[in-house]
Image (cartoon, grey):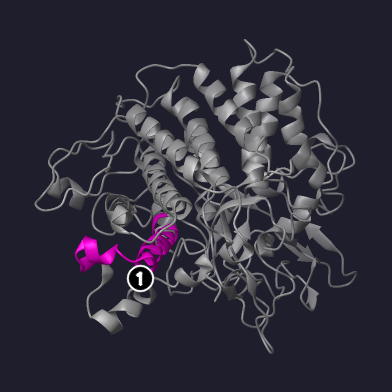
Amino acid sequence: MKRQIMVLFMGLALFSSCYDAMNEVPLERMPPEIAFKDSLKVEMFVNELYVGLNTGIGGYNSFGGGSANQNSFFDCVTDLGVLSPRGTNTAVNSFTRATFHSGSGGNTDSRWAQVYQYIRKTNLVLEYIHYCDNLSESKMAQYIGEAKLHKALLHYEMLKRYGGITIMDDLFEGGNIELPRNTFEECVEYIVHLCEEAAGGLPLRYPDNDYGRLTKGAALGLKAKVLLYAASPLFNENPIAGTNEIQRYASADNTRWDRAAKAALDVINLKMPDGSPVYELFPSYERLFFTREENREFMIMRMQGMTNNVEVRNGPAGYPGATGNTSLTQEFIDMFELTSGKLPKDDTNYDPQKPWENRCKRFYASVLYNGAFWWDREVETFVGGKDYTALSSTAKGCVTGYTLRKHLDPEVRISGVQKKTYHDFPLLRFAEILLTYAEAANEYNGMSDDDLVDDDMVYSCVNRLRERAGLPMIEDKTKGEMREIIHRERTVELAFECVRYFDLRRWREAERVLNRPVHGVQITKDVETGDFVYSDPIEVEERIFPERCYYYPIPQSELNKNAALTKNPGW
């Protein structure tokens, strides 16, 4: 029987029921010398850790659980998207209006209690796995590596939300535990150390029936991701007022960029025993998110079974069964280059009345625009069209002129004879590693923003993505120009993958980018000629981002339980 991790993502109930029926005692409540003695039970413990990827990390289900906003995207709180109906979702509003808080239910992305529960599960495995006497040496090393990498992932997800947190390296059984937050630097080094230890016991690749398990490359990739995050301005040369070593480094250090670049290069250079690369870009950006076979780009992912829920919630609202949750902003549309390699504002051949013409391949894989063919007809986002809704309406539909296409499979059907597909959500993919090297190396080298970039690898990493997108190669750029290109490449390439919000924070750009309105266009149809007229950009929604939002507030319930915890500034 195939043992794909996907099966175990159905949750803890599925995990425990196998043994509840036979033993009437959940595994976690058994004496460890019994629960961990048999290799099958150990495998179940390790497999259940993967459920934590659902609990601890955002993805398709950022807002709404079983509500109409299920399978919506966290990027709707950024300058990339607007959740429809506009302004009606309290979870989204708490970010876009900066009203989330430390009280009960005050931050739907808090994750604090859930993440620590899963950290405890990793500690259970690491503490007691040696009771098992029928595991091979390689399998023991693999399970230990998986547990350590899960623990690293969970600590990282807390770090990027809160800054320094309380490191939980032990079980701490019994009684109330009052432990202070570790410093930002201690947390970074702890996560990096876990990644390095995990990498030593994990394989480069698994057989197909274990697709989705954590690998050596995943461990090294997370290490690079963490080091890039830690090298960024928010924690170094440009901290916010009131922070200290809990939220940032004591002082800036440019060599942190070099460390991140070297960590990313270790992943890029990983080879299989036959000399072939472990990771490579999938040829089609459009099919990347629905393909498992020969997909060497996904490194860490949330596995999901066959489903069409993402299409149901995000397909244009005029299609039977679809609710059109995600409208795309004009800010996002303007980030896509034309095939000339220029942005719309810089290309004299760009026609704002035909904004879909001559755009890069990522545009067509990410955006459903008025007149695009989808399923059995053309998309209608013009005023009065089937997929349109007015800004003042509480009905679902497109409010910006553009609706989401990325993560939607055109081969899926949501009405009539339904057809489903895999919807694995990437938490880390090789494209991000390429951009990690490019960003870190670019920031480390050169004394000023006017210096020419002379690292060929920086160009190569970015150009590999541009080649897939059908864009011309870049060369002979200054450090400042490359920074702008790399930031835009990250935004467009990794859009709607829960990256943008945290990028803007670490770059210290959120106060500028997320503290202003987002825009769309109104498209009107000439009833006589059938021509469409695009308006100038119109304001769709006001956004607010005060300085305190660079860090989440520690939940008040946790402060009440642990007097040693300290608040983040501004909260």
Q: Does residue 439 appear left or right of residue 42 in this picture?
A: right
* Number of numbered callouts drawn: 1
- Helix, strand or loop at label 1? It is helix
The region drawn magenta spans 28-56
Residue 36 on the magenta segment:
yes
With respect to residue 392, does 219 lie above or below?
Answer: above
Residue 539 can be seen in this image:
no
Q: Amino acid at mark 1?
A: Leu
* Of the pair 395 and 17, the residue shown nearer to us: 17
Which residue in the rendered view is the most extreme toward the top? 447
**Which x, y percent locates residue 419?**
68, 81
Q: Quadrant of residue 341?
A: top right
* Of the pair 81 and 183, the residue shown nearer to us: 183
* Of the pair 429 and 552, the residue shown nearer to us: 429
- The C terminus lies in which quarter of the figure? top left
Q: Residue at x 49, y 40 (%)?
A: 200
Q: Does residue 90 appear left or right of residue 205 in this picture?
A: left
Residue 188 on the magenta segment:
no
Q: Which residue is mark 1?
A: 12
**Which x, y percent locates residue 454?**
74, 17
